[in-house]
Amino acid sequence: MVTVDARPAPYTFDLPSTALLVIDMQRDFLEPGGFGESLGNDVGQLRRTIAPLAALLADARAAGLTVIHTREGHLPDLSDCPPAKLRRGAPSRRIGDPGPNGRILVRGEYGHDIVDEVAPRPGEPVVDKPGKGAFHATDLDALLVARGVRSLLVTGVTTEVCVHTTVREANDRGYECLVLADCVGSYFPEFHRVGLDMIAAQGGIFGWVADSTSVRAALPTASLPRSSS
Ligand code: C5J
């Protein structure tokens, strides 16, 4: 068993029943010309997650941890995109519209794929999801059950949307989620801070929060100095 410092209390997990979940680290959210920018967001806000997540991925892979990626997006005919989602707001480009990285938030397009720095390795499942939550209309739960996973180290974007929705879904399904504060990001620094507080408040109502350095130091293949726990 591995124990790391976390809010609101230390978080304990064992490697065989733990997965590193990497949520929606897609060009559509992190690079100019995609879905995030079309909504008026400064995509630069999310890029600080890339370096710590790449370092965590390297240590997690070396430790043999299960790594699972997700991508938010829709079929080319948009048949899996609820009209309410398609019509919402006043973006400069809507889902399915052409953009510099291909059609916005459409599967198979360049913008829909994961940024190079944290790209999936062969054998790592990539779960395509039409919604904000990674359990909705996907086989993520079956995939985790098949691997005996009970604990999730949660990373990706954005803190208050797809990360939060997924953590809430996971919590209701009995998974214990540790959200890694430096590896999740929001276009809104205040939403990021409060989003993390909401997870850890009330005795950890949805889960735990820690920095990735705590996890990396505790892994058996640590490239950081081992923690005392
Ligand atoms: C959003 C996401 N923000 N991955 N998606 O629409 O958080």
Image (cartoon, grey):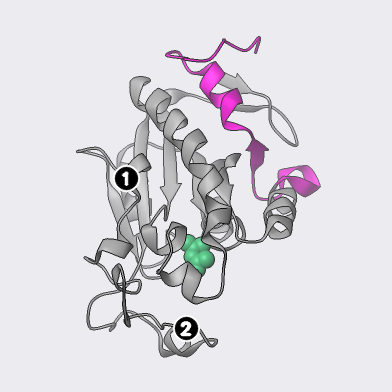
Residue 167 in view here: no
Q: Are marks 2 and 1 in contact (CB under 8 Å)?
A: no
Identify the residue shown where x is 66% and y is 61%: 188
Q: Is residue 114 magenta?
A: no
Q: Which residue is mark 2?
A: 92
Residue 111 in view here: yes
Q: Element at badge 2?
A: loop
The x and y percentages for residue 79 are 28, 84
3D distance between C-alphas at marks 2 and 1: 26 Å
Q: How many marks?
A: 2
- Where 19 sits versus 195, above or below? above
- Where 199 sits versus 107, above or below? above
Identify the residue shown where x is 51% and y is 57%: 166
**Type of amino acid under label 1:** Asp
Q: Residues within 10 Å of mark 1 (few under 14, many from 20)?
A: few
Q: Element at badge 1?
A: helix
Specify the segment rendered in magenta.
200-229
